[in-house]
C-alpha cells in the first residue's frame, strides 16, 4: 500500500493480537461499535469450530484516537485472546522446565504451513510456525479494515460481501450478473441478522449447509468462494503507469494474502477466456447516470483504474487443512510414516473469510483514495473526492 502502513503481531493462542496503522487522516470519526461489529461478523459462520465459542473479540485502542476522532498519528490497537488462559504453558513467553512443555508437533498437515515453515525456520516443533500462520491473525486485519471502511463510508463508498459457492453448490447459477439478482435489502439484512453461510440465494444456501454437514460427518473439510463488492468508488483510483500501481493487481494481491485463498477474479475473471470481445467489454449505457455501463463484466476496473462501476472481487477459498480424518504424513524427526497432526479447527471458514475479504478490499481502496486525493485532515479528503466526482460527471446536453 502507498499511504497506509499496517503492521500486526500476535500468535493464535498467545496473549492477543496487536496492530499499528499509519497514514489515516486526522479528524475522522471513529465508531468502536462498528469495529466490534465487524469483529463479531468475522466470528459468525456455519462450520466454525469451538474456538469461536470461546473468543468474544473486542478492540482496545492504545494510540492515535482522542475524543472519538483520529489524530493523524499512528493508531495502535489490541484484540485480546480469551483462550490464552488455557495455553499459558504451551505458549509461554518465558522459558519453562522441559517437563511442563507439551510434546512437540512433528507430523505436518498437508496443505498447511507446517512442513515448509518448519524447514524454513529450522524448528522441530510445528507449533512455532502454525501459530502465526493461523487465520486468527486476521482479526487484527479486520480492525484495520473496519477503520478503512469508516473512512470510505465518509466518502460515499460501501463495502460488502457474500458467499457464492460451497463445494459444487453455487448461488444463482444461471445469472451472469449475480449483483443484479441479489434480493433488495439483503445487504442491510446481512448486517443485522446474517444467515448461517451469508449466501443471498436461500435455495442454494440450504444445499450448501448440507454439503458442510456431509463434510463434517466424513471428518473432512470443504471450500468454496466468496465475493467482495465496493460500491461508490470514484473514477480514477489506481494507475496504469507501473505494474505495481494497477488497482486490480493491488486488490488481487491483498485478497490472495488471506489465509487459504488460492485464486482471485476481478469481474468475470476466468469467464472471459471462452468469449469474444463483443461479449466481454462493457459499453456505456446512454440512459444511465454519469458514465454507467450496461454491464459490469470488468468488475469496475479497466486498465488498472476504477471506472465508477462497483468493484467486484471473487476469491477461491481452499478447504481447511486440518482434517478430523487426517491425511498421511511423515514425522519430521524420525521420518516414520503416520497420520497428520490434528489441530482444533473448522469444517469451512467461508462466511468468516468473506469478512476478512471486506477488510482487505477496504484497506486497498482507502489507501488508493488517500494516495489519489491526499489530505492530512478528513475534511480535505472529502472535499477532494467531491471535486473529482464533479469533474468526472458526464456532461448533459
Image (cartoon, grey):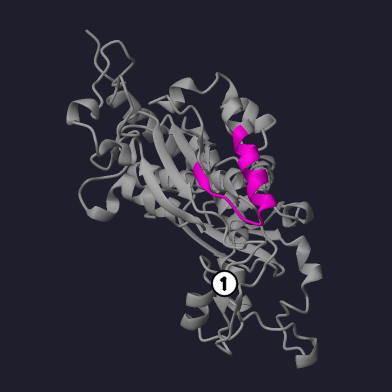
Q: From the viewer's perspective, is residue 324 above or below residue 37?
A: below
Nearest the eye: 113 or 386:
113
Callout 1: 10 Å neighbours few (<14), some, many (20+)? some
Residue located at (33% from left, 43% from top): 372
Q: Quadrant of residue 396?
A: top left
- Vertical relation: 351 (above or below) 83: above
Instruction: Confirm whether the magenta stretch covers residue 28.
Output: no
Query: Can you see residue 97?
Result: no
Q: Secondary structure at mark 1?
A: strand
From this view, report whether residue 273 is shown above or below residue 220. Answer: above
Image location (x, y in percent) of residue 362: 48, 44
Query: Which residue occupies the foreground of this view, 385 or 187?
Result: 187
Q: Residue at x 24, y 36 (%)?
A: 274
Answer with the quarter of the image where residue 166 lies: top right
Which residue bears the numbered disc 1? 328
Q: Quadrant of the N terminus?
A: bottom left
Start-end of magenta stretch: 207-225
x, y percent for residue 307 = 30, 32
Amino acid at each position: 500500500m502507498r499511504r497506509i502502513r499496517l503492521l500486526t503481531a500476535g500468535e493464535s493462542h498467545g496473549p492477543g493480537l496487536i496492530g499499528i496503522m499509519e497514514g489515516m487522516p486526522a479528524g475522522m470519526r471513529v465508531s468502536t461499535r462498528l469495529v466490534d461489529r465487524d469483529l463479531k461478523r468475522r466470528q459468525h459462520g456455519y462450520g466454525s469450530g469451538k474456538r469461536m465459542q470461546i473468543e468474544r473479540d473486542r478492540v482496545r485502542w492504545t494510540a492515535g484516537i482522542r475524543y472519538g476522532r483520529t489524530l493523524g498519528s499512528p493508531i495502535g490497537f489490541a484484540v485480546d485472546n480469551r483462550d490464552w488462559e488455557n495455553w499459558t504453558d504451551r505458549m509461554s513467553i518465558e522459558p519453562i522446565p522441559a517437563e511442563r512443555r507439551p510434546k512437540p508437533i512433528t507430523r505436518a498437515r498437508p496443505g498447511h504451513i507446517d512442513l515448509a515453515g518448519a524447514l524454513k525456520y529450522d524448528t522441530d516443533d510445528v507449533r512455532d510456525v502454525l501459530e502465526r500462520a493461523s487465520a486468527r491473525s486476521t482479526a487484527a486485519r479486520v480492525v484495520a479494515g473496519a477503520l478503512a471502511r469508516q473512512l470510505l463510508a465518509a466518502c460515499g463508498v460501501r463495502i460488502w460481501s457474500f458467499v457464492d459457492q460451497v463445494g459444487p453448490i453455487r448461488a444463482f447459477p444461471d445469472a451472469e450478473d449475480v449483483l443484479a439478482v441479489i434480493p433488495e435489502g439483503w445487504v442491510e439484512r446481512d448486517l443485522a441478522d446474517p444467515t448461517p453461510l451469508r449466501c443471498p440465494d436461500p435455495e442454494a444456501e440450504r444445499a450448501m449447509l448440507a454439503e458442510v454437514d456431509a463434510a463434517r460427518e466424513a471428518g473432512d473439510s470443504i471450500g468454496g468462494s466468496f465475493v467482495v463488492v465496493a460500491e461508490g468508488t470514484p473514477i480514477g483510483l489506481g494507475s496504469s503507469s507501473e505494474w505495481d500501481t494497477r488497482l486490480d493487481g493491488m486488490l488481487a494481491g491483498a485478497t490472495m494474502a488471506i489465509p487459504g485463498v488460492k485464486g482471485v477474479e476481478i469481474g468475470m475473471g476466468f469467464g472471459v477466456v471462452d468469449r469474444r470481445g463483443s461479449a466481454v467489454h462493457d459499453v456505456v449505457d446512454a440512459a444511465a447516470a454519469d458514465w454507467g455501463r450496461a454491464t459490469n463484466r470488468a468488475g469496475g476496473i479497466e486498465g488498472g483504474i476504477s471506472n465508477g462501476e462497483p468493484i467486484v472481487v471473487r476469491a477461491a477459498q481452499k478447504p481447511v487443512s486440518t482434517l478430523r480424518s487426517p491425511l498421511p504424513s511423515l514425522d519430521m524427526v524420525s521420518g516414520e510414516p503416520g497420520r497428520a497432526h490434528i489441530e482444533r479447527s473448522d469444517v469451512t471458514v467461508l462466511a468468516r473469510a468473506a469478512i476478512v475479504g471486506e477488510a482487505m478490499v477496504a484497506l486497498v481502496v482507502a489507501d488508493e483514495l488517500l494516495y489519489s486525493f491526499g489530505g492530512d485532515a478528513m475534511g480535505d479528503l472529502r472535499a477532494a473526492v467531491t471535486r473529482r466526482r464533479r469533474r468526472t460527471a458526464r456532461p448533459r446536453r
